[in-house]
């Protein structure tokens, strides 16, 4: 091992990426507990109309709870939220952060009050405890000012390969860029993905290779056991339930999912890590992929942000990847972190460097002494190993976290239409089982599909893909082989949703 690796006390980095919430919305009011946090005071506001100097202003409140419907967070919606005007070609405007209320109100009357509110600390008790006991980063931005999928691509590859929205052609081919998973493997380190539905990391083409099928583990069956047995790999990615049924509620925090379910999920993950014999070697990072349309007062960085790979995004935006997205909640947890730590602007490697999703592969490169960066973006991004500010691990870290309080009074709506990201997951699974070769792909397959139908579809598709991988292995296929199915019949039928989620999604190895 190199000197850099042996000096770091961290042997396992755990990453959990929640969905669609801004920093101010989730953690802004934590400033009342720790004034060092760049949060909110209640003086923040947005006009209902940015073009009317006499417009009513909506002040930021602390009344968030159960939220429905979902605010706007497309490229155009985010542009208006940041700059206060609707997107037009060739605009180069400063980020005023004044357009959240206006954009929300254009979707539905009264939605401005939804996006201009945040959670009281006691409403998110798990985060309240973690922020107090460990570290919060109050200057972590999403990698691109748009929705989920492109930002999730940045997290593990420091680029979206030009994507600014869903690209069904790329879902078929699989995004071709090199990922941090391959970098870890090339340097002799291990990784594991613990999923609750077919994992979104399969958006990357190389993650569909036979050699990686054993790196996928069903969360409910394997995560706690691997923690107890001290078998967590060097890089752990935890994926949540992106869909919800009445039996198993969504825990990714994407509206209209109940945030208390996300709190329970994070409590479960933390307590499993805390009880592990590997605890003193763990750094656990909780972030959100993008802001979800919710207000944040910190202007996005627009100076000195490098394009990852000089790819320009598609029409009509032709985005140059030269500015970041809106600030998102970020909590860092380790016994090597002093309680009440606030991580703000990074000290480098460049004068304009910021914390953003590419900071994850950048930091893994530093902790594990990996050979090379993935793109120009992770070479530029700030690294967060500096949050490990102790010379010895703490012994007073909480063993358990508070119990969240349910926010939603009604049952989940299994017959709801799919969100855009849910549609993308269904389309990805259509690729895995060969339905992309049919005329139902890409749009007919998700048109009018309900959540309960999607749950049924994705588990069958993922099972078919895993079975095909096993067959290919038995037939002597090379480990770098990517299974491509064409119009396969789906044979498995089950009438028990609960059994399907917990057993049919089970990966073939522990």
Image (cartoon, rainbow, N blue to C red):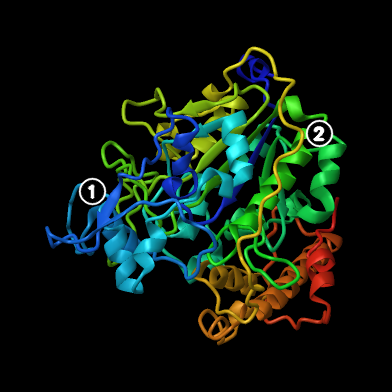
Which residue is the site of mark 2?
276
Whether residue 440 sits left or right of residue 320 in the image: it is right
- Which residue is painted at 43% across and 60% down in the image? 147
Residues 354 and 461: in front is 354
Whether residue 136 sits left or right of residue 61 in the image: it is right
Q: Secondary structure at mark 2?
A: loop
Query: Where is residue 451, by image quadrant?
Result: bottom right
Residue 372: tell me if it is visible. no
Q: Which mark is residue 96?
A: 1
Whether residue 450 sits left or right of residue 276 in the image: it is left
On-image quarter of the N terminus: top right
Q: Residue furthest left?
A: 53
Q: Secondary structure at mark 1?
A: loop
**Distance (Cα) linking label 2 and label 1:** 45 Å
- Which residue is painted at 78% across and 29% down in the image? 278
User: From what the image shows, is residue 437 above or below residue 431?
Assistant: below
Image coordinates of residue 26 in percent, x first then y, are 49, 48
Whether residue 102 sits left or right of residue 401 in the image: it is left
């Amino acid at each position: 091992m190199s000197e850099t690796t042996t000096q770091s006390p961290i042997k396992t980095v755990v990453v959990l990426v929640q969905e669609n919430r801004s920093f101010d919305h989730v953690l802004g009011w934590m400033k009342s507990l720790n004034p060092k946090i760049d949060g909110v005071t209640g003086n923040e506001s947005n006009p209902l109309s940015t073009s009317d100097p006499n417009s009513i202003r909506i002040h930021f409140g602390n009344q968030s709870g159960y939220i429905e419907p979902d605010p706007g967070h497309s490229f155009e919606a985010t542009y208006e939220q940041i700059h206060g005007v609707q997107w037009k070609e060739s605009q180069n405007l400063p980020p005023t952060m004044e357009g959240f209320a206006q954009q929300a109100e254009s979707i539905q009357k009264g939605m401005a009050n939804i996006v201009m509110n945040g959670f009281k600390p006691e409403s998110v008790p798990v985060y309240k405890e973690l922020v107090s006991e460990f570290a919060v980063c109050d200057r972590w931005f999403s990698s691109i000012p748009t929705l989920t999928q492109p930002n999730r691509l940045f997290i593990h590859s420091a680029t979206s390969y030009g994507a600014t929205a869903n690209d069904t052609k790329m879902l078929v081919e699989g995004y071709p860029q090199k990922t941090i998973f391959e970098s870890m493997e090339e340097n002799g380190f291990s990784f594991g993905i613990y999923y609750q539905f077919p994992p979104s990391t399969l958006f990357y083409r190389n993650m569909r290779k036979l050699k990686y099928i054993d790196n996928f583990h069903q969360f409910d069956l394997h995560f706690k056991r691997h923690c107890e047995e001290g078998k967590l790999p060097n890089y752990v990615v935890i994926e949540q339930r992106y869909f919800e049924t009445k039996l198993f509620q969504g825990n990714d925090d994407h509206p209209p999912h109940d945030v208390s379910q996300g709190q329970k999920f994070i409590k479960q993950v933390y307590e499993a890590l805390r009880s592990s014999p590997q605890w003193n070697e763990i750094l656990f990072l909780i972030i959100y992929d993008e802001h979800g349309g919710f207000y944040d007062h910190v202007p996005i960085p627009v100076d000195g942000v490098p394009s990852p790979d000089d790819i320009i995004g598609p029409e009509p935006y032709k985005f140059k990847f030269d500015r970041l997205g809106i600030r998102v909640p970020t909590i860092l947890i380790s016994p090597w972190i002093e309680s009440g730590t606030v991580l703000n602007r990074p000290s480098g490697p460049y004068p304009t460097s910021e914390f953003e999703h590419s900071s994850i592969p950048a930091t893994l490169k530093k902790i594990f002494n990996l050979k090379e960066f993935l793109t120009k973006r992770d070479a530029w991004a700030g690294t967060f190993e500096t949050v490990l500010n102790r010379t010895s691990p703490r012994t007073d870290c909480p063993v358990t976290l508070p119990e969240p309080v349910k926010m939603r009074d009604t049952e989940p709506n299994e017959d709801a239409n799919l969100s855009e990201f849910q549609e993308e997951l269904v389309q990805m699974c259509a690729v895995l089982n060969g339905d992309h070769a049919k005329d139902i792909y890409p749009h007919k397959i998700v048109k009018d599909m309900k959540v309960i139908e999607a749950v049924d579809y994705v588990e069958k598709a993922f099972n078919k893909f895993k079975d095909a991988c096993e067959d290919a292995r038995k037939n002597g296929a090379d480990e770098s082989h990517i299974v491509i199915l064409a119009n396969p019949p789906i044979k498995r039928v089950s009438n028990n949703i609960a059994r399907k989620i917990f057993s049919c999604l089970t990966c073939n190895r522990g």
